């Protein structure tokens, strides 16, 4: 009997805990936080990360934004008009012309065409002028809780807590509505995987221009960018742009703007 009891206890101990329960309203968020905190602690998240999770609030504006991404349903022409493509192209050319050695070195280091990085920078944050005002931890935690995309965002939520433990994020870090961070709007899991210390100060901070653009170039390089092989639709590197953003109009717009910046 003791052997049977001991075996039963061992099996129960070995059984993985159930995933935190998602929800579609704010009512279950606090319960989800407690469940996710247990998962995070089991995964090795420390006191700072757990405290940051406890401090999060249900982000109503994030849910509204996630349900209302109208621009990705526009035609390509309308999308580029709404996103200010002519301005991005004009400013992108000026940025490269003003600092050609910086962008040249970036391209040489990672093998990614500088104009593509510049086009992404312009599209994502208007060259760093609008990196967002949402609380990153609350936004990502809310999306991890929300049933619509819980599977996708749960990993990013866990990554965010690890980044808090490392001092790379805090409970007050601001970003975009979906919790993206920095000059080119990285999700937290991608910061862990592709983040680069571009200025050599020992810290990966995507609100820093050098770190943000180096990380963007590194992402594209790691996804398989082929130097000098083209990035317009139908060319080898267009598939890498598709890895950056899933929306077809966004992908085409980046490729077109980059080609115009390079002219």
Image: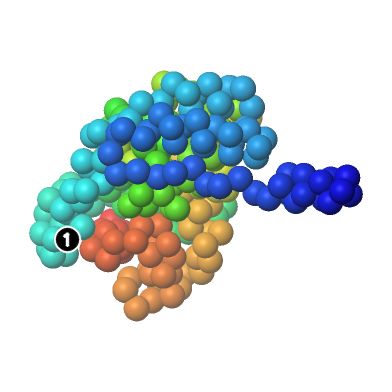
Residue 218 percent coordinates (x, y): 53, 52
> Hey, which quadrant is residue 257 in on the image?
bottom left
Foreground pick, 119 / 64: 64
Residue 175 percent coordinates (x, y): 35, 33
Reply above or below: 142 against 53. Answer: below
Q: Residue at x 40, y 41 (%)?
A: 145
Viewed as shown, does residue 229 lie left or right of 89?
Answer: right
**Badge 1 element:** helix
Viewed as shown, does residue 5 lie left or right of 239?
Answer: right
Q: Residue at x 52, y 62 (%)?
A: 223
Foreground pick, 38 / 83: 38
Can you name the residue that lies furthest to the bottom here? 234
Q: Residue at x 55, y 55 (%)?
A: 110
Q: How does the figure colour the protein chain or chains? A: rainbow
Residue 176 percent coordinates (x, y): 32, 36
Question: From where the camera sits, is residue 233 visible?
Answer: yes
| Residue at image mark 1 | 73
Foreground pick, 176 / 82: 176
Reply above or below: 184 against 86. Answer: above
Q: Quadrant of the C terminus?
A: bottom left
Q: Residue at x 87, y 48 (%)?
A: 1
- Badge 1 density bin: few <14, some 14–19, many ≥20, Cα 10 Å: few
Q: How many marks?
A: 1
């Amino acid at each position: 009997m003791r052997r049977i009891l001991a075996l039963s206890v061992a099996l129960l101990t070995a059984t993985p805990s159930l995933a935190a329960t998602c929800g579609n309203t704010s009512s279950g968020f606090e319960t989800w936080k407690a469940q996710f905190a247990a998962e995070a602690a089991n995964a090795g998240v420390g006191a700072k990360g757990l405290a940051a999770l406890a401090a999060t609030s249900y982000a109503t504006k994030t849910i509204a934004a996630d349900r209302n991404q109208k621009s990705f349903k526009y035609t390509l022409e309308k999308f580029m008009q709404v996103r200010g493509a002519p301005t991005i192209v004009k400013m992108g050319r000026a940025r490269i012309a003003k600092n050609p050695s910086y962008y040249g070195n970036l391209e040489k280091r990672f093998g990614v065409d500088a104009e593509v990085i510049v086009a992404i920078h312009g599209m994502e944050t208007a060259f760093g002028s609008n990196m967002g005002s949402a609380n990153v931890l609350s936004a990502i935690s809310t999306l991890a809780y929300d049933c619509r995309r819980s599977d996708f965002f749960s990993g990013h939520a866990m990554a965010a807590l690890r980044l808090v433990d490392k001092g790379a994020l805090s409970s007050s870090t601001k970003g975009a509505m979906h919790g993206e961070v920095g000059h080119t709007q990285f999700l937290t899991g991608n910061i862990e995987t592709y983040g680069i210390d571009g200025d050599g100060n020992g810290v990966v901070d995507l609100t820093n221009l050098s770190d943000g653009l180096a990380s963007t170039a590194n992402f594209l390089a790691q996804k398989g960018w082929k130097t000098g092989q083209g990035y317009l639709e139908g060319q080898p590197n267009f598939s890498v742009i598709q890895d950056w953003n899933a929306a077809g109009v966004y992908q085409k717009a980046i490729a077109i703007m980059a080609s115009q910046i390079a002219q």
